[in-house]
Image: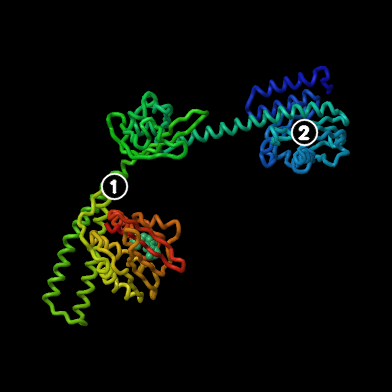
Amino acid sequence: MQKQDTRTSLEILLDISRELATTLDLHTVLSRILTLSTENIGAERASLVVLDENAKPIDAAIIYDGRLTPNTVSQLQDVVANGLAGWVIRNKKAALVPDTSNDIRWLARSTDSSEIVQGKSALCVPLMAMDELVGVLTIVHAEIEFFTEADLSLQQAIAGLAGIAIRNARLYEYSEAVQKRYQELFEDSIDPIMITDLDGRILEVNHKAIQVSGYTGKDLLKMNIKNLHVLHDEVTGSHFDSIPLVGTVSYESVLHCEGNRLLPIEVYVSKITTLGTPILQWIVRDIEVRKDLDTLRSDLTAMIYHDLRSPLANIVSSLEILSTLVPMEDDSAIKSVYQIASRSTDRMQRLINSLLDINRIEAGMQVTEKNAVQIPVLVDDAVETTLPNILSKNQRISKQVAQGLPELCVDEDMIKRVLINLIENASKYSPSRSEILVTANHVSGSVEFCVDDNGPGIPEDFKERIFEKFNRVNSFSTRKGLGLGLAFCRLAVTAHGGKIWVENKPEMGSRFIFTIPID
Ligand code: ADP
């Protein structure tokens, strides 16, 4: 093959740069680089390996006598690890090898014919984009000392263009993959998604949005999001200006579907900037089933509580009548049976009343039955109620009520139930023979009640969650419970203007604290 010395290096580079600028497809770029390099320098074979940011080969191609073989990473693996290309990658320097049989960096490949194993000449250059190594290009000629320093300079200049072309092609490939992934997520989402501009005009909708709304895609693209659902502009701002650039805002609303059908929904809106233009992404979740279930559950619970309350009240009053009719000696069996029955009914009444209170307070009702309560009496009653249980577990309970505490104006029964709940938990979650301490103190305008125990304490990430309904530290705990007690305590204390929280004691155990404002 003759060297093309009739064309200047500048002309060759100009041609190559024009050619490489016409495509962003990585395989086409590789093939063009290999063809142009071999044609312009007059080599007969060449290989190009594309590297990732850790200099690991991710793509490769070989050209031999004008025939291109793509996807040759596995064939070139050993050359990249131990051969001339490997040396160039490690040193980020070009190499001109006049005679490969005299160069230890040259690896004779087992597939090479004996004629090829004899001396050849080679040029190997790193392909750089900015300062990043993106590949390595090796060109080979069967004659020794075929390549000159001028060829090396030209090849290095070609490598500069090739490096940028490969980097652009890879960036393009990456952005195409990201776009494709987003499109798939968008289309396959189980929730309706709509994209709008900042005026609310719908620009894009996914398949689920069409299915749920009942409108055609064309119809939706003519609509404004404001006409499609009841907007909560106290959340979004009337011009969507309250939607932050980072994060999502959400609210419940109603979707106006085709044919005047209304669907309860939860809306999640976020502001996204693509190609310099901010857009809004609306993810809509169908909550019709959840709403129906919520209504059913609260109807059902309200009914159960009311239907349990009156028969229970009958049992309580019958027990009281019985206690006046039957003489009860202090240590008689009748008295002890009566006490068990009476304690159990009291417990059931407390439970039902707390469940009713949860329902009432959650529905926004105020605490109305307030009266002046003496704190020592409140604490004594709570301790006395829980004492039989505590003694049966071989535990001890003590109380420390500060002198001169003012009276509190509260729903006495409700706040006593809060204290009983905390003491019962302290006993339930602590081992036998442990100690429980109940204290009441005056702390900056409030009375602060504490219940301390020597139990396992509360893990950090559960300190808030245990006050939510049905949340337990270990749902598989062998201790019975529904996870409603502390939810009731928080609602009751908050309804009185106070606060409740838990701290872990430095030694062992937890301290549940709640405050009630003195006013
Ligand atoms: P329940 O006792 O019915 O599970 P609660 O709402 O009273 O419901 O308590 C919620 C969870 O908080 C309990 O399941 C338990 O895991 C944890 N917990 C409550 N009090 C204590 C305590 N004194 N020590 C350790 N864990 C506790």
CA gap, disc 2 to disc 1? Answer: 69 Å
> Which quarter of the figure has residue 493?
bottom left
Q: Which residue is mark 2?
A: 125
Mark 2 or mark 1: whose residue is earlier in sequence: 2
In depth, the one of 113 and 324 nearer the eye is 324
Q: Read off the residue under disc 1.
A: 294
Q: Secondary structure at mark 2?
A: strand
User: In this rendering, is residue 82 above or below 497?
Assistant: above
Q: Nearer the viewer, residue 460 or 337?
A: 460
Find residue 147 and report its horizontal and vertical position in percent.
85, 28
Residue kind at label 1, given as amino acid type: Asp
The quadrant where residue 518 appears = bottom left
Q: Position of residue 132 (x, y in %)?
A: 69, 36
Left or right, residue 280 beside residue 261: right
Q: Position of residue 389 (x, y in %)?
A: 30, 72
Residue type, mark 2 in image: Val
The image quadrant where one finds the C terminus is bottom left
